[in-house]
C-alpha cells in the first residue's frame, strides 16, 4: 500500500462513526445515565432514543403511582397492598410491571454502551422488546384498558348491536296512523318530596263513565337525579299506577308530561315503560319518577301529567319519520362534501403550484414563497376538521354552511400537499422540450406540467370527496350539518334502531361512492 492509500485509509478510519474513542468499560459506566455511553461513542440517535424511552417509562410509572396517593411509599409499614382500593392496586401493579421491563431495558442499555465503545453495538432487538413491553404496560393503564370488563359485559352490547346491524324489522321501520286511547292522572313534583306533598292532595281529572282512567299513589314527590345529603343522586319517587277501562291485551305506554319541559317517554334499559291490560282492561304498574328539569324560578311544585297511552293502527303502513330524517341528512352530507371538495379543488390547485419545489426553486423570492405556502398547508392540515367545524360554528352558526367551511379549509391543505407532490414527481423531459422551443414559464406549465398532473389530480380529488363524505358525518355531531346531527341525537337518546338506519345509509352511500370513484379512475387515470 503506497503512502497516499495509507493516508486515505487513515482518514476514513478517523471519520468512521463507530470509531472507539473511550475504553469499553468506560462506555458501560457512562451508560449508567441512559444513552450517555452511546452518545459519547457517536451513536447519537441510538443514545437519544434509548435515553428518551427509558426515562419516559420510569417517569410515566412514577406519575401513575403518584395518582394513587401512595406515590413513592409503596409498602410502608402502615400500608399493605390489601389496604389499597381496586384502582390503586391496579395502578401499583401496572406501574411496577412497567418499571420492571424498563429496568431490564436499562441493564441492556449499560451493556449496549459497553458494546458501542468496543466498536460493535449490540443487536437492539432485546432492548426494544423490553422497552416496548414497558410502554405497552403503562399505556394500557393510562388508557384504562380492561379486557376483563369487556368480556364480562359483552352481553350488554349484543341487543344494541343487533338493533344497529338490522334496523329493518317491519315493526321498527314502518308505522301507521294511530287512534289513541289514554288515561291521565296528575302528580306534583319538586326538588323535595316533602315540599311537593305540602301542596296536596292533587285534584285529579274528571272521567266519564266507561272511559279509561288512572289512579296513582302517591300523587306527589320528586324526580330522579336530586342530590341526597350524602352527595349521591337519588332515584325519583316510586309511583304505583292502576289503570281501568283500557282496551284489553293492547300495550299501553307511559308518557310523562311536566309543565316545565315537553312530554317524553321514560326508558328503562333503552326500552319504553309499558303495561298490558288484562281481559277486563285493568293493569298495575310501578315506576320511579324520571329526571327532568324544574325551573329555578318555579314557585311551588310543578304539575306533571302521568299518561298511559294505547294506540291502535289505522290505514296503510308508511316509513317512519326517522327514515326520512336520515335520508335528508345523508343528502345534506353528500352535498356538503361535494361543495367542500369543489371549493377546495379550486383553491388547492394554485396553491399546489406555489408549493412545488421544482417550480419554485428558481430564485430566493420564489423559494421563500414555497416555504411559506408549505408551512401554512402543514399547519392547516394538522388541525382536524372537527376543530375547524367548531371555529366555523362560532363564525357562521351551526348548520351545513359551517361544515362546508370546515371541510373546505382542510381540503385545501390536504389536496394542495398531494397536488404539489404530484407536480414534483413529473417527468422533466417534456419541460425541457417545451423550454427548448422558447416557451415562457406560463406556457411551460400549461403545455408540459398540466397534462402530466391531470390524472393524479383527478384521482386525488375523487379520493378526497370520499374522505369528505365520511368526515362530514363526524363534524355533523358538533353541529356542522348533515346526517351526523341526527345520528348523535339518536345515540344520546339510546334510539339504536334509528342509529342503525343512519349507519346503513352511510355505509350504502360510501360503498356506492367507492364503486363510482373506481370507475371514474379507470376512465381518466
Image (cartoon, helix red, strand yellow):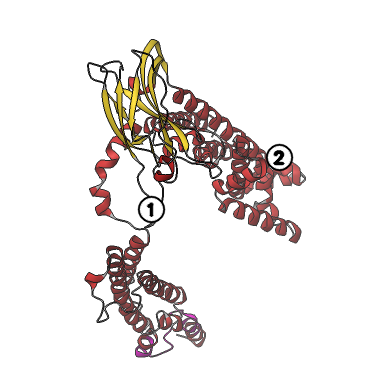
Q: Over which residues does the magenta segment extend?
A: 11-27
Circle 1 residue: 228
Which quadrant: the C terminus? Answer: top right
Residue 273, horizontal then vertical, whole percent: 32, 31
Residue 298, horizontal then vertical, whole percent: 53, 41
Q: What residue is drawn where x is 26% and y is 16%? A: 248
- Which dot marks residue 446? 2
Horizontal side of residue 87 vs 1, given as left or right: left
Residue 326, horizontal then vertical, whole percent: 47, 28
Q: What residue is drawn where x is 74% and y is 59%? A: 363
Horizontal side of residue 160 vs 389, given as left or right: left
- Which residue is at the front of the view, 389 or 305? 305
Mark yes or no: residue 166 visible: no
Q: Residues within 10 Å of mark 2 (few under 14, many from 20)?
A: few
Would you say residue 26 sits in the magenta stretch? yes
Instruction: Give above or below for 229 relative to 341.
Output: below
Q: Residues within 10 Å of mark 1 (few under 14, many from 20)?
A: few
Horizontal side of residue 443 vs 218, given as left or right: right
Residue 305, horizontal then vertical, whole percent: 43, 29
- Which residue is at the front of the view, 347 or 198? 198
Quadrant hosting residue 63:
bottom left
Horizontal side of residue 152 vs 237, given as left or right: left
Question: Which residue extends farthest top?
Answer: 315
Measure how far apart labels 1 and 2 are at the Cα level: 75 Å
Amino acid at each position: 500500500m503506497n503512502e497516499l492509500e495509507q493516508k486515505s485509509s487513515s482518514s476514513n478510519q478517523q471519520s468512521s462513526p463507530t470509531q472507539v474513542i473511550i475504553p469499553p468499560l468506560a462506555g458501560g459506566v457512562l451508560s449508567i445515565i441512559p444513552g450517555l455511553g452511546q452518545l459519547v461513542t457517536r451513536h447519537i440517535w441510538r443514545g437519544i432514543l434509548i435515553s428518551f424511552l427509558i426515562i419516559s417509562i420510569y417517569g410515566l410509572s412514577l406519575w401513575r403511582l403518584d395518582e394513587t396517593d401512595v406515590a413513592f411509599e409503596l409498602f410502608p409499614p402502615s400500608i399493605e397492598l390489601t389496604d389499597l382500593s381496586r384502582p390503586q392496586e391496579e395502578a401499583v401493579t401496572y406501574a411496577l410491571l412497567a418499571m420492571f421491563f424498563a429496568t431490564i431495558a436499562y441493564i441492556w442499555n449499560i451493556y449496549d454502551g459497553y458494546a458501542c465503545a468496543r466498536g460493535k453495538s449490540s443487536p437492539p432487538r432485546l432492548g426494544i422488546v423490553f422497552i416496548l413491553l414497558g410502554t405497552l404496560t403503562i399505556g394500557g393503564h393510562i388508557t384504562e384498558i380492561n379486557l376483563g370488563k369487556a368480556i364480562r359485559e359483552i352481553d350488554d352490547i349484543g341487543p344494541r348491536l343487533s338493533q344497529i346491524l338490522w334496523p329493518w324489522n317491519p315493526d321498527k321501520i314502518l308505522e301507521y296512523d294511530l287512534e289513541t286511547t289514554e288515561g291521565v292522572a296528575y302528580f306534583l313534583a319538586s326538588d323535595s318530596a316533602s315540599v311537593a306533598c305540602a301542596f296536596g292532595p292533587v285534584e285529579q281529572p274528571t272521567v266519564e263513565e266507561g272511559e279509561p282512567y288512572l289512579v296513582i299513589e302517591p300523587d306527589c314527590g320528586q324526580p330522579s337525579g336530586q342530590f341526597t345529603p350524602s352527595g349521591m343522586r337519588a332515584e325519583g319517587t316510586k309511583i304505583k299506577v292502576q289503570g281501568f277501562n283500557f282496551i284489553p291485551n293492547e300495550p299501553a305506554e307511559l308518557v310523562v308530561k311536566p309543565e316545565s319541559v315537553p312530554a317524553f317517554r321514560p326508558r328503562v334499559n333503552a326500552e319504553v315503560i309499558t303495561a298490558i291490560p288484562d281481559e277486563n282492561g285493568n293493569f298495575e304498574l310501578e315506576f320511579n319518577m324520571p329526571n327532568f328539569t324544574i325551573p329555578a324560578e318555579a314557585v311551588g311544585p310543578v304539575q306533571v301529567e302521568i299518561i298511559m297511552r294505547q294506540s291502535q293502527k289505522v290505514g296503510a303502513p308508511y316509513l317512519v319519520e326517522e327514515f326520512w330524517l336520515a335520508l335528508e341528512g345523508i343528502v345534506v352530507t353528500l352535498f356538503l362534501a361535494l361543495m367542500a371538495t369543489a371549493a377546495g379543488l379550486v383553491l388547492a390547485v394554485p396553491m399546489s403550484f406555489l408549493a412545488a419545489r421544482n417550480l419554485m426553486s428558481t430564485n430566493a423570492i420564489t423559494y421563500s414563497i414555497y416555504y411559506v405556502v408549505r408551512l401554512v398547508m402543514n399547519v392547516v392540515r394538522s388541525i382536524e376538521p372537527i376543530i375547524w367545524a367548531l371555529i366555523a360554528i362560532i363564525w357562521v352558526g351551526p348548520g351545513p354552511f359551517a361544515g362546508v367551511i370546515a371541510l373546505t379549509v382542510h381540503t385545501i391543505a390536504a389536496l394542495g400537499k398531494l397536488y404539489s407532490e404530484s407536480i414534483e414527481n413529473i417527468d422533466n423531459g417534456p419541460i425541457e422540450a417545451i423550454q427548448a422551443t422558447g416557451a415562457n414559464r406560463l406556457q411551460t406549465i400549461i403545455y408540459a406540467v398540466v397534462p402530466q398532473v391531470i390524472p393524479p389530480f383527478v384521482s386525488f380529488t375523487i379520493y378526497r370527496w370520499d374522505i369528505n363524505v365520511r368526515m362530514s358525518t363526524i363534524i355533523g355531531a358538533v353541529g356542522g350539518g348533515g346526517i351526523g346531527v341526527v345520528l348523535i341525537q339518536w345515540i344520546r337518546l339510546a334510539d339504536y334502531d334509528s342509529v342503525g338506519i343512519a349507519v346503513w345509509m352511510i355505509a350504502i352511500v360510501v360503498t356506492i361512492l367507492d364503486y363510482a370513484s373506481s370507475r371514474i379512475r379507470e376512465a381518466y387515470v
